[in-house]
C-alpha cells in the first residue's frame, strides 16, 4: 500500500459543482462565520443553551454519521485503501474516525480531501475547528469550503437521527495500522477489512 505521504502527493481532482450548490454553501458559511464572530467566545448560561462550540460538535457528529450511511461508502473507502486516490473515500474515512474520537486522524483525512478541493471536507474542518474554539482556523476553512471545486452527491440537509455509540466500529478502527505524521499524533490507514464492514457498522449508528 502507498504511504500517507504518497497519498498526499497525489491529491487534486478538479470537478466544479453547480452555481446553486456554491450559493447555498456560501450562505451557510456566512451564517456560521457571522455567528462565530458575534458569539463564539461567549458561552451561553449553564443549562440554558449549548455554546456555539457545542453546536458545531453536534452538527459535525450528525453530519459524519449521515455521510457514512450513504450507499456507496464501502466502495469509496475500499478505493482509498487500495489506491489512495479517492477524496470522497477520505471524507468518509475521516467521518468514521471522528465518530470514534480519533480526531487527529479525522483532521488529517479531512485535510487530504479538502486539499483535493472537496467542499464537504472543508466544511467538516470548519466545524471541527469551531468546536474547539479555534476561530481563525474555522474561518479559514469556511472560506476554503466556499471556493472548493468538488462536492459529493449528498442530500442538502443531514438526517436528524443522532448517532449512537458503536463498540464494533471502535474495535474495527483499533485494528487499523497507525502512522505518525508531522502535526498529527495518530493517523490511521484505511484498510479493506474496514471497507468490507462499513455498511454494517454505519447501519448501527
Image (cartoon, rainbow, N blue to C red):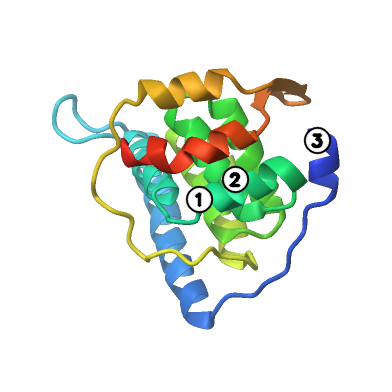
| Mark 1 lies on residue | 73
182 left or right of 58 in image? right
Do the numbered discs 2 and 1 sit on residues whose CB atoms are within 8 Å?
yes
Disc 3 is placed on an element classified as loop
The residue sitting at 43% across, 35% down in the picture is 131
Task: Tell me where residue 37 appears, x and y as whole percent.
Answer: 43, 47
Q: Residues within 10 Å of mark 1 (few under 14, many from 20)?
A: many
The residue sitting at 37% across, 49% down in the picture is 66
Q: How far apart are marks 3 and 2 (CA)?
A: 14 Å
- Image mark for residue 1: 3
Do the numbered discs 1 and 3 sit on residues whose CB atoms are within 8 Å?
no
Q: How crowded is mark 2: few (under 14 residues within 10 Å), some or many (20 or more)?
A: many
Residue 139 visible? The answer is no
Indicate whether 12 appears above or below 23.
Answer: above
Q: Distance between the residues labelled 1 and 3?
A: 20 Å
Task: Tell me where residue 19 appears, x and y as whole percent.
Answer: 53, 81
- The foreground one among 96 and 139 is 96
For marks 1 and 3, the one nearer the N-term is 3
- Image mark for residue 77: 2
The residue sitting at 24% across, 33% down in the picture is 44
Indicate whether 87 appears above or below 194.
Answer: below
Amino acid at each position: 500500500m502507498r504511504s500517507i505521504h504518497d497519498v498526499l502527493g497525489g491529491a487534486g481532482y478538479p470537478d466544479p459543482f453547480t452555481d446553486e450548490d456554491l450559493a447555498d454553501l456560501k450562505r451557510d458559511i456566512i451564517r456560521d462565520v457571522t455567528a462565530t464572530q458575534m458569539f463564539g467566545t461567549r458561552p451561553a448560561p449553564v443549562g440554558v443553551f449549548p455554546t456555539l462550540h457545542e453546536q458545531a460538535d453536534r452538527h459535525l457528529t450528525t453530519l459524519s454519521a449521515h455521510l457514512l450511511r450513504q450507499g456507496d461508502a464501502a466502495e469509496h473507502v475500499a478505493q482509498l485503501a487500495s489506491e489512495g486516490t479517492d477524496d470522497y473515500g477520505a471524507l468518509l474515512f475521516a467521518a468514521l474516525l471522528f465518530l470514534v474520537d480519533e480526531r487527529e486522524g479525522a483532521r488529517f483525512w479531512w485535510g487530504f480531501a479538502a486539499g483535493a478541493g472537496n467542499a464537504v471536507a472543508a466544511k467538516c474542518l470548519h466545524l471541527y475547528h469551531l468546536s474547539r474554539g479555534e476561530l481563525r482556523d474555522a474561518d479559514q476553512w469556511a472560506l476554503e469550503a466556499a471556493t472548493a471545486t468538488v462536492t459529493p452527491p449528498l442530500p442538502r440537509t443531514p438526517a436528524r437521527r443522532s448517532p449512537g455509540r458503536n463498540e464494533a466500529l471502535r474495535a474495527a478502527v483499533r485494528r487499523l495500522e497507525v502512522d505518525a505524521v508531522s502535526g498529527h499524533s495518530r493517523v490511521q490507514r484505511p484498510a479493506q477489512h474496514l471497507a468490507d464492514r462499513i455498511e454494517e457498522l454505519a447501519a448501527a449508528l
